Image (cartoon, helix red, strand yellow):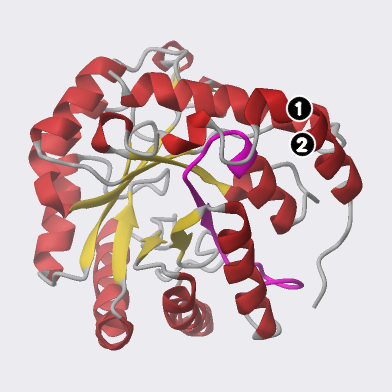
Amino acid sequence: MPQPQRDRDGVVQVLQALSGCFLLGSTSRSKKDLGEMRKAIMANTFPTGIPLADQFHVSAGAGFAGIEIGLAREGFFSIDGDPADIATVARLAHETGLTISGMLAGPLGQIPPTSNDASVRAEAARVVRRTIEVAPDLGVDTLLLVPGRVEADVPYGVAWDRALAFVRELIPDCERHGITLAVENVWNRMIYSPIEMRHFVETIGHPLVGVYWDAGNHAPYTWPQHWPPVLGNHIRRVHVKGFNTNAGPTWPGFVRLLDGTIDWPAVMASLRAIGYDGWVTIEIGFGGANQSPAEILRKAREFSADMDTLLSM
């Protein structure tokens, strides 16, 4: 299925016009191992309507080494889409020189595996299984997994047990395809401390189940630098975003990466202390739709520069 062409010509023209600032294959892109860790960007942070191909080209042009993607609900590169789309995405990675650093296991915020509705739980499992099947064809070995959420009618103990059962159910699929499920700490009213997270993955006790640690998500509740010493080598991937704790646990607290109140030197020191040398993926939204290609490219370059600063700490 062809991708929508929204702004495609504009993106290409701006990339060409600004090639002196951030040319594909530029010096910035060659520095993949700043501080031993590698920088990636999360594809779904781009404005709505930007084709995946343009996300790849912008990310590469801005100096990122990797990009984290996910199957869409419908359309191009979707859960039930044309299998040929997988090869198209693989070619995109080859053409741009980007590594697909990871994938989302599925839109599990919309279909939580802890739901009281058994059909929702079954759909969540189907979606993750499909992603597990697709990932190896794109060179991906790790999926970001949101384990569910606590709700008024889904008590913590019930959500915990269902989340454990959900992950355990997927282990045979992971073993068959060589895929790690990395559980992310998110705003889901469960697993809000590093000790809880460690207990969760160690209760499962399988080498293909680890942690996708987001350094910014629980900054309102904990000091991010306290997580890596507790989680150690359970951490398989890292997300970063800025947060201003003065805003409290609210969405306006999320800010540009190096703004806010997170002690990034301490965070990076804690990651290096446990020997982490994997992907670090920035998850900062580009803002609303209808931005010009030049504006999107400018922001991507700023995000990339912020990542260079972070990884050199």
Image coordinates for residue 294, horizontal then vertical, percent: 81, 28
**Mark 1 crowdedness (10 Å alpha carbons): few <14, some 14-19, many ≥20:** some
Q: Amino acid at mark 2?
A: Leu
Image height check: is 212 above or below 168?
above
Q: Which quadrant does the C terminus fall into?
A: top left
240 in magenta: no
In this rendering, position of residue 220 left or right of residue 199 = right
Image height check: is 91 above or below 273?
below
Q: Nearer the viewer, residue 98 or 6?
A: 98
In this rendering, position of residue 231 left or right of residue 153 = left
Q: Tell me where residue 265 sits by quadrant.
A: top left
> At numbered mark 2, what does the secondary structure look like: helix, strand or loop?
helix
Q: Which residue is the site of mark 1?
A: 18
Magenta region? 60-78
Image coordinates for residue 224, horizontal then vertical, percent: 25, 28
Mark linked to residue 56: none
Residue 171 visible (yes or no): yes
Q: Nearer the viewer, residue 131 or 150?
A: 131
Query: Residues under labels 1 and 2: Cα distance?
Result: 5 Å
Residue 226 visible (yes or no): no
Q: What residue is shown at x 50% (from left), y 30% (from top)?
A: 27
Q: Tell me where residue 1 sits by quadrant.
A: bottom right
Image coordinates for residue 296, horizontal then vertical, percent: 74, 32
Q: Amino acid at mark 1?
A: Leu
70 in magenta: yes
**Mark 2 crowdedness (10 Å alpha carbons): few <14, some 14-19, many ≥20:** many
Q: Tell me where residue 168 sits by quadrant.
A: bottom left
Q: Nearer the viewer, residue 52 or 25?
A: 25
Q: Which residue is the site of mark 2?
A: 15
Whether tag 1 and tag 2 are in contact, CB under 8 A, the answer is yes
